[in-house]
Amino acid sequence: MRLIDNVVRSFKVAKVFRENTDRINSIDFSQNGETLISSSDDESIVIYDCERGTHKRTLQSKKYGVDLIRYTHAPNTAIHSSTKVDAGFAVKGNRGGVKGGLLGPFNTFRLPQDKGCDWTGLKFSPDGKTILISTNGQVIHLIDAFQGTPLQEFTQGHVNNKGMPLEASFSPDSQFIFSGSTDGRVHVWSAETGAKTAELFCDHTGPVQCVQFNPKYMLLASACTNMAFWVPTVDDNM
């Protein structure tokens, strides 16, 4: 199935998980798309099976807290930051590690300063051609990844009236932008034209802070305190 406008508009919630008692602060799909991992302000890590649409496992991180959880290249290893003072980061899994180094910039971009909000996230598109800049305000920026040229500003219908760092993400083909909103909805735009494609409704009980598209399967995940799995309800021939 191709991800085109009418398919995006048809996305409906297939499953809602209520494994957490506080805000889900970060989510990440494994590279093979088989699992989704989340971290929460309730200091738990939850792993979901994307093929079966089920809760797989819950881990506790009471000593360190947990935020910004990410899979490494291995599907059985994840890394996350701590929410405790001076605790740093932790690696979860059977094996794995962290490598670091110093790299100089190959280019530097100077972009206009947003008024009344700060940048809270940067993501390269899957095709590597653009960079998505999330903020804690009403605007999301799309710029050229090589020259820093502003390409789009996504603002239409997007609500962030609480100054929260709401996640924005690409579809796997880099053609669509998905973002959470403080109105409990998921907003979708065309990356090429900047036009609003869809506004997806769900029974989210609070601001949708996390939104990501599965890299392998036709599955969208969004989270507030609850986790929602979305799937299309039409095919690309309709």
Image: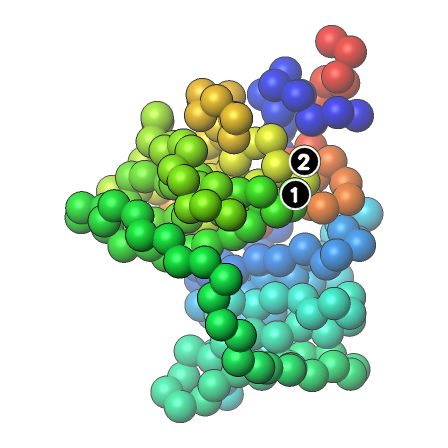
Badge 1, how many Cα within 10 Å: few under 14, some, many 20+?
few
Q: Which residue is mark 1?
A: 127
The C terminus lies in which quarter of the figure?
top right
- Rendered location of residue 156, percent (x, y): 35, 26
The residue sitting at 48% across, 41% down in the picture is 144
Which residue is outermost to the top?
Answer: 238
Reply above or below: 156 against 224: above
Q: Are marks 1 and 2 in contact (CB under 8 Å)?
A: yes
Seen from the viewer's position, the closer of residues 147 and 15 is 147
- Rendered location of residue 114, percent (x, y): 23, 46
State the image quarter where residue 230 is shown: top right
> Label 2 sits on what residue type?
Asp
The answer, for residue 21, to whether it is visible in the render is no
The residue sitting at 78% across, 83% down in the picture is 95
**Secondary element at image label 2:** loop
> Label 1 sits on what residue type?
Asp
The residue sitting at 73% across, 74% down in the picture is 77
- Rendered location of residue 110, percent (x, y): 31, 52
The N terminus lies in which quarter of the figure?
top right
The residue sitting at 73% across, 36% down in the picture is 218
The answer, for residue 1, to whether it is visible in the render is yes
Q: Which mark is residue 173?
A: 2
Seen from the viewer's position, the closer of residues 68 and 109 is 109
Seen from the viewer's position, the closer of residues 226 and 156 is 156
Badge 2, how many Cα within 10 Å: few under 14, some, many 20+?
few
Reply above or below: 212 against 86: above
